[in-house]
Amino acid sequence: MPIATSRGRHPLSPDDWTTEKYDAFARELNVIHADVKANLGSEDVAYVKNVRAMSRLAEVTGRTLIHFSLDPVTWFAGVLALSGHHQLETIEIGHSALHGAWDSLDDAREFHSSRLRWDTPIDEEAWKKEHNVLHHQYTNVVGRDPDLNYGLLRVTDDTSWVPYHLLQVAQFISTAPVFTWTIAMHATGLTDLTHPPNDPTYASVLPDKSPRTILRAVYATAKKAVPYYLYEFVFWPALGGAFWWKVLGGNVLADILRNVYSCATIYAGHFGDDLEYRHTDFRSQGRGRWYRMQIESAHDYSVPSWVSVLCGALDHQIEHHLFPRLPPNRLRELAPKVAAICERYGVRYSRNTWGENLLAALKRLGRMSLPPALATG
């Protein structure tokens, strides 16, 4: 059955899209995916190990400069290096690894999803359930995709409006510096506690809101966040002795820079007026429809190759949502082929600048923060 769409967008299943056309669309995407999977091997192992080597070098450089700097310029250079380490570990390596990008490669076992220890305060198992299972399976489906309404977030007309949504642009600004900490609570379901009760337009991570379930979520959050906090903001500053304040300030700023960068990366790929948002009862009913759903639920954006590495290939958000288990270097390789297939089939493939996408996301958040009667037009 047809689905409702927001202003300015077309439905996912127009009359000219027959079952045969969807099947053909899926076959073409399956072919390029299969070609990449068949060629995964030593090149991909070398790639991720090289990124890890760059990350470790950035960490050693950053921590050394922060500890032993004698001037603000050298200290800030250390902050940038340490932030680069955090960024590479968070997205290019960690995010991809927890999706299983290198699980099939025996020579990359340290990067397998069951082994990797993520350089964030986010619990790995909780995140894999919330992100891989819920978000990626039900992308932009109201009441099923938790990423449509974590914390105060409301990004679609179909989500019930409540007064605290007036604050969601302020939420974006205030939580960007602590973005990974917010995700840590979102992954375990603690941000579910801000949702209105018994509202089917809000997707929950928690199975229920009993005290026992909430305490389990608190424990799952703390068991990863507390050691991370102690390591970055107690252990390393303690090694600085009398200059603990300089080390603490550097580590906090490096963490903030990673969080702001990651926040801008993710928001720019996920939100905007031209994306599709679907009702709770939506079912893709076939691989072709699911592929199209994923393509029309995300943005790509154009950045230099070295910036793309710091984005973890999430500047190729479309390709990531199509094939989330592929390594980031392969997503970059696939992008032109995906774009060409979309052009042949008349599927919207959005690729703008990073700034344009981020501005579109903020405008969307601003419009959705208003009561429905004021948000139209």
Image (spheres, helix red, strand yellow):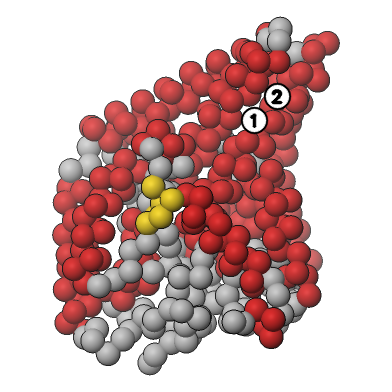
Q: Quadrant of residue 106?
A: top left
Amino acid carrying label 2: it is Gly
Residue at 49% in and 75% down: 277
Residue 209 vertical position relative to residue 181 in the rendered view, above or below: below
Q: Which mark is residue 254?
A: 1
Please name whichever residue, 55 or 107, is drawn nearer the observer in this view of the structure.
55
Give the structural element (helix, strand or loop) at label 1: helix
Q: Which mark is residue 231?
A: none
Q: Quadrant of residue 341?
A: bottom left
Which corner quadrant holds the N terminus? bottom left
Q: Which residue is mark 2?
A: 250
**Mark 2–mark 1 CB contact (< 8 Å):** yes
Tell whether 345 sits left or right of 226: left
Amino acid carrying label 1: it is Ala
Visible in this render: residue 247?
yes
Give the structural element (helix, strand or loop) at label 2: helix
Residue at 50% in and 80% down: 6
Mark count? 2
Which corner quadrant holds the C terminus? bottom right
Q: Position of residue 105 (x, y in %)?
A: 29, 39
Please name whichever residue, 237 or 302, is drawn nearer the observer in this view of the structure.
302
**What distance separates the C-alpha of mark 2 from that of mark 1?**
6 Å
Q: Residues within 10 Å of mark 1 (few under 14, many from 20)?
A: many
Residue at 28% in and 52% down: 335
Q: Position of residue 18 (x, y in %)?
A: 21, 86
Residue at 21% in and 48% down: 36
Residue 199 vertical position relative to residue 133 in the rendered view, above or below: below
**Residue at the bottom extreme of this rendering:** 1
